[in-house]
Image (cartoon, helix red, strand yellow):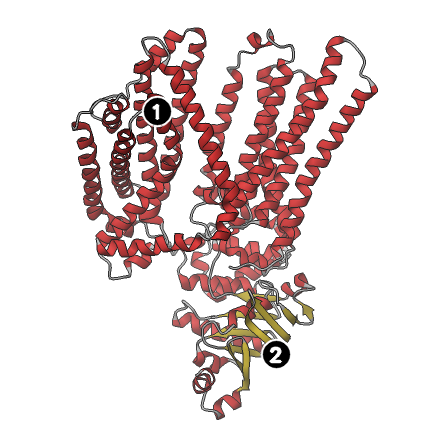
Amino acid sequence: MKTTILLVIPKIKSIKNSINLKALLKRLPFIFIGLIFWLAFYIGCYEALNFIRSIEFFGEILSKKLLCMTFFSLSIFLVLSNIITALSSFYMSKEIPFLLSKPIKIKEIMRLKTVETILSSSWMVISFIPPFFIAYGISYDAPFRFYLVLMLVFIPFLLIAGGIGIAVAHLLTRIFSIKKIRLALLAAGLLLFLCLYLLVRSQWSISFESPERFINALLAVKTDSPLIPSFWITESVIPLLKRQTPDNLYPLLILSNGAFMLLLSGAIGKRLYLNNLERIQPSIKHQTKVSTEGFYPGSNLAFLWKDIKIFFRDAGQWSQLFIIFALILIYIYNFRTIPLKALSEISPFIKEFMVLINILMAGLVLSAVSARFLYASISLEGMAFWIIRTSPVTAKKLLWSKFLYGFIPVTVILLTLVFITNIAIGADSLLMLLSLVTMFIMCISISGLGAGTGAMYPKFRYENIASISTSPGGMLFMLFAFSVVLLTVSLEAWSFYPYKKAVISGLELSYAQIGQLVMAGILIIILNSLAFYIPMKMGKKRLEEDFSL
Amino acid sequence: MIVLDKVSKSFNGKWAVKELNLHVVKGEVFGLLGPNAAGKTTTIKMMTGLLRPTGGKILINGYDIVKEPIKAKSIFGYVPDKAFLYEKLKGREFLKFIASIHGIEKSTAINRIDELIGTFGIKEIEEELIESYSQGMRQRLLFLSALIHNPSVLFIDEPFVGLDPFGVMMLKDTIRRLSSTGVTIFLATHSLHIAEELCERAGLINRGSLTCIKNKEEIITEGGLERLFLKITS
């Protein structure tokens, strides 16, 4: 154990060394955004919980059900997250060869990796879930004991998920190759998420027709088996909310199972870890393959060709497409289920409103997709960036190549998305044209913004690709991208409203209204041109400066 | 030909390289030697355009690396000390990429790649992903990629890291052959015996300053590079 602590110390020191006043000030806007999220999440949970509790007869049952379902979902998320993280930290981490070469017992390395896995899998839950529990505590006016017991049982709850995740990771690596496991897990996780979403979404639409049916459907979801940890943790805290004494059996069950799962993962690891590590070493086949020469890219297509080849070979890059497509499916599904007919009776502008909302939402999807395809593109050169820096290639050419690499797929995806959703809404040809042109303009500007800011804040040293777009620079890009999208859509709404009003009333547009239309168009073009030009220029300048490689 | 005229580089006010003056003639093999953190890699990084000098001028065959970087970069090859490559490309694909960014026409590039792959002994693994290459194979691939466009100047940082005896021998032969055809070679290294064997002149750098430059005869007269190295650095 002493050695494990020794091994953990450098990691703590690394974190400590990276925290200073300058770094803190740099992250201040993000801390502020995080606090606002916390507050909004708390208010949302509190209001929703109060509403649920106010439902006659079912209120308290539903409240308990919601807590149990939350713990159940958390446990599934945590197990999946632990499996994926364990595969990375136990088998793919760059420090493993170093640790193995030192006089450190294998069980100490496994302990270190267990701590690392559980912490990195749980930090997101630990950061985002507190407002939910606080909302419960305040809604029930719970005593301090509730928060204390919750914290005490939540730690072994995390350990249970961690132990299961690590054990499964060892077993999977014994059976499959590491890359195939990650991919299969990601696909399975997304499929599960989509199924759950569609299930909930279909029951949600029932609730509009009949609240009783919705409640019955919710109650029918079985997440409260006495054999699972989510039930034990719910039973450990629910009585405390009502100022009752909980049965000691449940906290004891969680504690003992937390310890047991850790021991189990250790025992499985002891048996499999070293053998697995040997199995996954990359090996080379000494064979002379006779193959055709294939495509030769030439100087203009060199970067594009290289980036596309790497993209399709690197599971870490293309597996993120699953997440994007899942988001798009949910997005289209949502538009298909909007009760437009009923809503059009409330407002005659509903179609126009929905088209604008569609552009806005598609703009947000565009920003998220661009964060992956464009913002990350320069950073993805990684430590091999020296190759480009010492080659006879201008920063401008490199940046334009990265722009095209992201712009083409992003534009195809987004224009298709807007086209399909507009058809689902039943938009007429003018609305269709307007939204497609707007989306095309935004694709250019957001792509330029992504490539440019990505070049301004490159992160060549990364362990996983997702960390590039979640870096401070990535957050800044998202903030700017959202602002550009929001302003563009607002200007469009500002110009479109008088036009549609005149068309409906059969009147001709006044000079002032025509001026408003022209002005909005000019402002949209200026805004999007600046969003493209300034970051591209600044990114080019940054690429010409020194890099610590 | 390489000219360094009062080249300096500072990081956050601390001098990594101070007023370096150097002239390496065409076809010469020049070795830059020095202890760790003496400024060897910083100097080579400035010469290859990875870092910009804080002061002074660097000319590669008459082209200023700061003012005319593209022209300068098109005539030199660079082999860094750490072999970071595109792991998901195959060896042959990587070479095609490098040939493409140097603007080499297809048939010339293919012939050159075939020729170099044969010379450097990586024919068997050219269709394998680089991620599966050993350190020595990566080093060979790096050399090969640095030579693909027939450079007239070659910068090499710690050239023999990870190479097996056969690889070292092959590389030494290549350096000698290139030098005899008029390629200027600038190498930074810790391996004193190899520098002694290959270099016509050697410069010793310590704490960012070039302390002396000796030719082969002077090195022999003064008892070898090791003695000189210890004398200057102690």
**Residue B95 placement, left or right of B2:** left
Q: Amino acid at mark 1?
A: Tyr
Mark seen at residue B22? 2
| Residue A194 location (% of width, % of height) | 41, 25
Residue farthest left in this picture: A249
Q: Residue at x 80, y 24 (%)?
A: A515
| Residue A230 location (% of width, % of height) | 27, 27
- Decide: few, some or many residues near mark 2? Use Cα within 10 Å; few <14, some 14-19, many ≥20: some
Tell me where residue A532 sits by quadrant. Answer: top right
Q: Amino acid at mark 2?
A: Leu
Label 1 SS: helix
Q: Chain of mark 1?
A: A
Residue A294 in view (yes/no): no
Measured in 3D between alpha carbons, the distance from the residue under mark 1 to the one under mark 2, in whole angstroms, is: 73 Å
Mark seen at residue A136? 1
Label 2 SS: strand
Mark seen at residue A409? none
- Decide: few, some or many residues near mark 1? Use Cα within 10 Å; few <14, some 14-19, many ≥20: many
